[in-house]
Image (cartoon, rainbow, N blue to C red):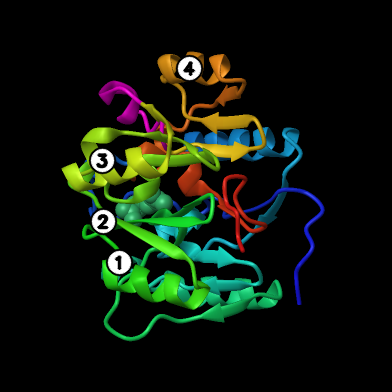
Amino acid sequence: MERRWIRPTILMCPPDHYGIEYEINPWMNRGRPSDAEEARKQWHDLHALLISLGVDVRLMTAVKGLPDLVFTANAGLVWHHKVFLPRFRHEARQGETPHDDVWFRSAGFETIELPEGMYFEGAGDGLFCGDTLFAGYIIRSDARAEQWVASQMRCRVIPLQLVDEHYYHLDTCFCPLKPGEALWYPAAFDEYGRTVLKQLVPGLIAVEPEEAARFACNAVVVGHHVALNTGCPKLEAELRMRGYEPHSTELGEFIKAGGSAKCLTLRLDGEDAALWS
Ligand code: ARG
């Protein structure tokens, strides 16, 4: 049965138990904790911004001891009424998956577990642009897992090796805007990845290193609106030139964990750039 969404619908999880409790990427440093109150404010500002853009925001309950559950982009890869659940590479995040599973099932989705021995971190590493699934691998997800997921969806998958530990999920360095158009940070990919992206996505918008480090590519696209962290003026100007409306909102407390706008969200009705067949 096909699910019908009336409005763009996004899953978020409030930062009630968010914090820097371990270090699994180069942004995280237990010596640089997040400020709970400031994190709450920043999350609420993003939440309010998305609502103002017409998004129906659904919420998942935060769980003590799972500080990164706030990053719902990793809760799964949604495809129609099915969700491929994550299998996290780091033990610290593995406890999230049963909570993701419960949430999706209660929302009426069919959840699918990956075969044993494969790592896959959901929409953090799997992004549709047109009818193709672009998939980041090696730092977190496995290319083999992405091949398996794509075989279930019978879609073309392009595994892209991520070469910079700072850009450990594909959504930190690549952001589809619409079919054929995407933001990217070229230095996060190897030569093959750069070549194949240029071939398959004619409208690539490169972000500068300083703005990539402000998580410019970790943007939430809702129609022609693009929500992103502050500190990316060059990208904002470029987006305006191309007919998009950027909305910046401070997300520094989440960058301390290696996440920003996109990581804090999961589109449940299909990304604007995704052409599911
Ligand atoms: N601290 C989290 C991790 O390292 C951040 C996840 C960010 N999520 C994302 N989709 N990029 O796993």
N-terminal-most mark, 1 or 3: 1
Q: Is residue 236 left or right of residue 173?
A: right
Crowd tier of the residue under label 2, counting other residues whose Cα lies within 10 Å: few below 14, some 14–19, many 20 or above:
few
User: Which corner quadrant holds the N terminus?
Assistant: bottom right
**Disc 4 vs disc 3: Cβ atoms closer than 8 Å?**
no
Q: Secondary structure at mark 3?
A: helix
Res 238 label: 4
Spot occupied by residue 46 in the image (x, y as percentages of width and height): 59, 36
Q: Identify which amino acid the numbered label 3 is placed on.
A: Arg
Label 1: element kind? helix
Q: Earlier in the sequence, mark 4 or mark 3?
A: 3
Earlier in the chain: of badge 4 and badge 1, it is 1
Going from the N terminus, do you reach mark 2 or mark 3 first? 2
Is residue 190 visible in this depiction of the protein?
Answer: no
- Quarter of image, res 48: top right
Q: What are the residue bounds of the magenta stretch?
A: 207-217
Q: Amino acid at mark 1?
A: Ala
Q: Are marks 1 and 3 in contact (CB under 8 Å)?
A: no
Return the residue at label 1: 92
Marks 1 and 2 sit apart, C-alpha to C-alpha, by 8 Å
Disc 2 target residue: 22
Mark 2 vs ligand 1: CB under 8 Å? Answer: no
Q: CA distance from mark 4 to mark 3?
A: 20 Å
